[in-house]
Image (cartoon, rainbow, N blue to C red):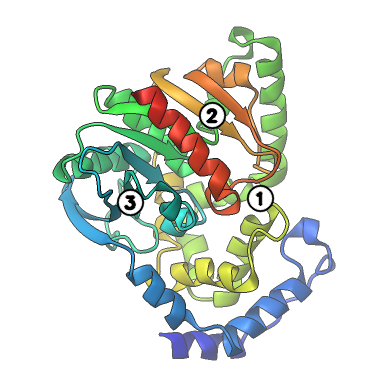
Amino acid sequence: MIDDLRERLQRTRRVTTPWSDDGTRGVSGARLDDLLERWATEYDWGVHERRIGGFPWVTVRAGGTDLRVIHQRSADPGAPVVVLLHGWPDSVLRFERVLPLLADLHVVVPALPGFPFAAPLTTPGMSVNRIAGIVADALDELGHPRYTVSGGDVGGTLAEILAGEHPDRVAALHLTNVAPQRALTADPAKLAPDAAAYLGRAAQWFRGEGGYIAEQSTRPNTLAVALGDSPAGLAAWIVEKLESWSDESAFTTDELLTWVTAYWVTGTIGTSFATYAEPVVLPDRVDTPTVLSMFPRDTKPEPRSYAEAFLNVREYVEHRAGGHFAAWEQPEAYAADVRRAVRLGG
C-alpha cells in the first residue's frame, strides 16, 4: 500500500488555479507541493504505524458491530473513568498527547465508526445517535457504568447525545463547543442578546467556511471518489482544515502527514462522512454538569449565554491559545479542564 501511495504521489498531476498562491482560497500550491514531496520521498509511515499500534487497543462487540477503542487503565481500579471523543478530520490521534497526562484515570478513546482505525463501515445508518448507543454499550461491556465524557466537533455532538440519553451513566461533560447543529435551528427570540448575536456570526461562518459540510452531507459518494483515489486531493482537503483551524505551528509536516496517512491507509475518508450524511437528533437540553473550554482559534467559539441555553454550564474556561484540535495543541490545558469535569461529576 505504501509503495502504491508513493507511486501515486510521484505521478500527481499538478493543478493550478488563478488563486494558487492565496491561502485564503484553500491550501496553496506551494504548500501542497512541499507536503507531497516529503510524503513521497522521506516520510516513514512505518515509524508512526508502530507507535499507534502500541496503544492499548481492545475490540468490543457493541450495538451489533465491533468498536475498537484505546483502553488506558489506571493502576487504581477505583479511579474515575474518562471517555475522549474525537471529531473530523482527525481520529484517536487527537488525544495522543493527552493520554500520558491522564495516566491516573481510566481512559477510553473510541475509534468512532467510519473513521481511521475503526472496524470497516459497509452499511448506511451510522448516525451520531447510533454511534452514541454503540459507545454506551461498549462502555458497559468494559465494566464502566459511570464516566465523564470529553469531546469536540463530532465528538462533542456525540457527547451531548450520550448525556441526554444516558443521564444515569454520564457524570459530567467536558466540551470544546456546543453541537453546531443547534445554531441552525435555535430561535433568536428565546436567547439572550449576545447569544442571539452569536447566531449571526455562526451563520456567517457557515456561509464562508462551511462548503465542506454541504458537500460531505449531500454528495458523500462523489467526494469519496475524488479524495479516496487521489492522495494529493486527500492531503489538500484535510491539511487545509488542520492548519486553518489551529494555532500556527500546531503541527509539524510529519504530524500533518501522519493524520492524513491514517485516512489513506485505512480507506476511511468516505465513511468518515457518515456523521454528516446521516440525520442527527439532539436532546433539547442537557442537564449534565458541564465544563466548556473555549480556545480562541477554534472555528466559532460560543459565548457562555448561548451555551447555557442548551447545557448546564458550571464552568466556562477561556484559554489564550489553541484551536479546534485543542487536545493536541494545548494538551496540558485540555487535561486540566477534563479534570475540572471529573471533579464536577464527583
Q: Earlier in the sequence, mark 3 or mark 1?
A: 3
Q: Quadrant of residue 180?
A: top right
Q: Nearer the viewer, residue 17 or 183?
A: 183
Mark 2 lies on a secondary structure that is strand
Q: Residue at x 60, y 29 (%)?
A: 317
User: Quarter of the image containing the C terminus?
Assistant: top left
Q: Element at badge 1?
A: loop
Nearer the observer, 89 or 328: 328
Left or right: 4, with 107 as reference point: right
Gap between marks 3 and 1 measured at Cα = 23 Å
Residue 271: x and y, percent? 39, 58
Q: CA distance from mark 3 to mark 2?
A: 21 Å
Earlier residue among tags 1 and 2: 1
- CA distance separating discs 1 and 2: 18 Å
Residue 337: image location, x then y, percent: 51, 35
Residue at horizontal 64 percent and vertical 46 percent from the top? 323
Q: Are marks 3 and 2 in contact (CB under 8 Å)?
A: no
Query: In the picture shown, does residue 111 fall above or below 172?
Result: below
Q: Which mark is residue 245?
A: 1
Residue 257, located in which quarter of the rendered image? bottom right
**Residue 282 appears in the picture as rendered:** no
The answer to whether residue 66 of the structure is visible from this angle is: yes
Amino acid on which disc 2 is placed: Leu
Q: Earlier in the sequence, mark 3 or mark 2?
A: 3
Which circle, 3 or 2, is nearer the viewer? 2
**Which residue appears farthest toward the front when viewing the image?**
76
Disc on res. 292? 2
Q: Which mark, by number, is residue 110?
A: 3
The amino acid beneath tag 1 is Trp
Q: Is residue 35 left or right of residue 16?
A: left
**Residue appearing at x 46%, y 37% in the figure:** 338
